[in-house]
Image: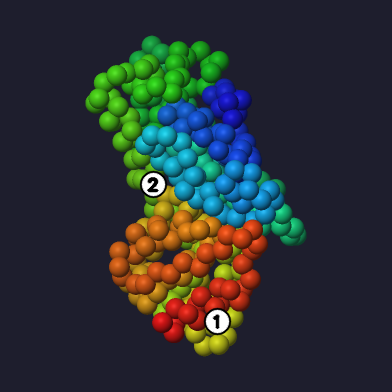
Amino acid sequence: MGMVLGASLAGKKVLTASSGPGISLKQELIGYAAATETPVVIVNVQRVGPSTGQPTAPAQGDVMQARWGSHGSYSIIALSPWSVREAFDLTVKAVNYAERFRTPVILLADEIVGHLRENVELPEKVEIYPRRVPKKTRAEGYQPYEPDEDSVPNIANFGEGYHIHVTGLIHDETGFPSGSPKVTENSIRRMHEKISRAADEIIEVQQEFIDDAEFAVVSFGGTARTAYEAVLSARKKGQKVGFVRLVTVWPFADKIIFELAKKLKGMIVAELNYGQIVGEVERAVKGQCDVKLCAKYDSTTFEPEEIESAIEEMINS
């Protein structure tokens, strides 16, 4: 993790990957990346925990770790693919978000997608967001952490002739540490605002069969593939069930979930953990409809029938 951050500060596009325990070990430097606003992509192929748990077994228990894994207050972007092709596409998007917002971005995959084999067609070219460059020279008063109009600083790369100081301590626009309460408040607020102000653009949610839906299944990652099959089966029985997939896990799709909840009787949250995303859904729904958890944490994937059973239970309750 430290090596990729050093490479990023020198101007390279960087990515590092692991599963649960390895991601836990990276947390201090994920926080450092957030504080120093160093672009980096971290791939987490989730599997059963805690600790070494069940290696190579499917799980989705690192959702909250992705958001809150390092200490202190900072924001994060996390994207969750459900196919091999989307793993490629979202990795490109993650690199672009990391560069654009100068932030760590997590690709929150899982063992299902990690071991998936599919035929794919990959594009010959992809659009890559260019590294932000200083708008001032040293003579013009360049400050590495002076924010642009979108609250993101344009930090020069190491070795390009600029004077740059990088520290995990709270720092002012010069990059040097500051013990000022005002600087601390402004720094933490800006780390959140640079992402929150672009949330509508960052947040991506796939919605299917929503127009006539009375209920919906909410899921993400590999579990969404099973949830989709369950929804198709339910609709064949005449049940008015929609499908909602969180492509962007963080920042959370509060507005979208709230608007959906206003026209639904209930939402079922299917996830391979003891219950993590369900709390975010309940918070976003604000009592507009019922929310039920369909959880599985025995080291096996969902079968469509298990989610169908949860749909039947909610409809008949």
Q: Quadrant of the N terminus?
A: top right
Q: Residue at the bottom extreme?
A: 238
Tell me the tag on residue 27: none
Please name whichever residue, 60 or 43, is drawn nearer the observer in this view of the structure: 60
Q: Residues within 10 Å of mark 1 (few under 14, many from 20)?
A: many
Task: Please state the horizontal and vertical placement of residue 302, each as a whole percent of the image.
Answer: 61, 67
Assign a secondary structure to mark 2: loop
Numbered marks: total: 2
Q: Quadrant of the C terminus?
A: bottom left
Residue 169: quadrant of the picture: top left
Q: Residue at (40%, 74%) from the top-left corner?
A: 266
Q: Is residue 172 above or below residue 222?
A: above
- N-term mark: 2 or 1: 2
**Left of 20 or right of it: where is 217?**
left
Assign a secondary structure to mark 1: helix
Q: Is residue 210 above or below residue 278?
A: below
Please name whichever residue, 286 or 145, is drawn nearer the observer in this view of the structure: 286
- Name the residue that disc number 2 marks: 198
Tell me the tag on residue 234: 1
Q: Residue at (53%, 61%) from the top-left corner?
A: 271
Callout 1, which amino acid? Ala
Callout 2, which amino acid? Ala
User: Which label sits in the foreground, 2 or 1?
Assistant: 1
Task: Please state the horizontal and vertical placement of residue 118, each as a whole percent of the image.
Answer: 74, 60
Residue 83: quadrant of the picture: bottom right
